[in-house]
Amino acid sequence: MLLRKWSETKHIYEPYEVPDSWHVSTYETDMETPVNCCQCGRELTFGESYTSMQVQTEVGFGYAVCGDCYFNHEVPERLASTGQGA
């Protein structure tokens, strides 16, 4: 499945491929629905996920991302790109 991912260094969206077997999602009516993290593929419930700042739909809705990827990758990359990261 082809998604798009924001490049913090280039400031553009780039094609981003995830396996077709992953259930990546931007919205679920049941917070207990199992989804895959759009970054690493880890399975979690939609209610446990964060909204990705990088992997987004064409209109800017972020896909579900696990806490590890959000806090250890996405947030530090965003801060570094704004000169606020270490």
Image (cartoon, rainbow, N blue to C red):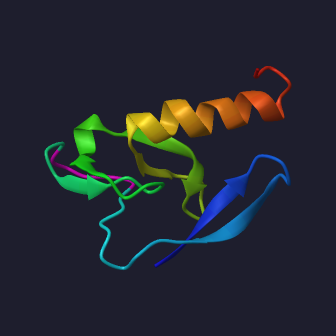
Task: Give the camera-side residue of 30 and 16.
Answer: 16
Q: Residue at x 34, y 39 (%)?
A: 49
Q: Is residue 16 above or below residue 55?
A: below
Up-down relation of residue 83 to residue 53 (above or below): above
Does the magenta run of residues contain 28? yes
Type of secondary structure dominating the magenta stretch: loop
Residue name at image x 73 percent, y 62 percent: 13
Left or right placement of residue 67 versus residue 42 in this view: right
Number of marks in the rendered image: 0
Could you tell me which residue is drawn at 86 percent across and 54 percent down? 10
Q: Residue at x 46, y 71 (%)?
A: 18
Residue 68 belongs to magenta span: no
Q: Position of residue 85 (x, y in %)?
A: 76, 22
Q: Position of residue 45 (x, y in %)?
A: 21, 45
Q: Nearer the viewer, residue 60 or 22?
A: 22
Residue 26, above or below 77: below
Along the horizontal axis of the image, is 2 left or right of 65? Answer: right
Q: Position of residue 22 (x, y in %)?
A: 32, 69
Q: Foreground residue, 33 or 75?
A: 75
Left or right: 9, with 4 as reference point: right
58, 24: nearer the viewer:
24
- In this rendering, the answer to whether 24 lies above or below 49 is below
Locate the C terminus and report the quarter of the image it occupies.
top right
Is 80 left, or right, of 20 in this rendering?
right
Q: Quadrant of residue 35?
A: bottom left
Q: Which residues are magenta?
A: 26-30
Location of residue 66 in the rendering, given as x and y in whole percent from the top left corner: 38, 41
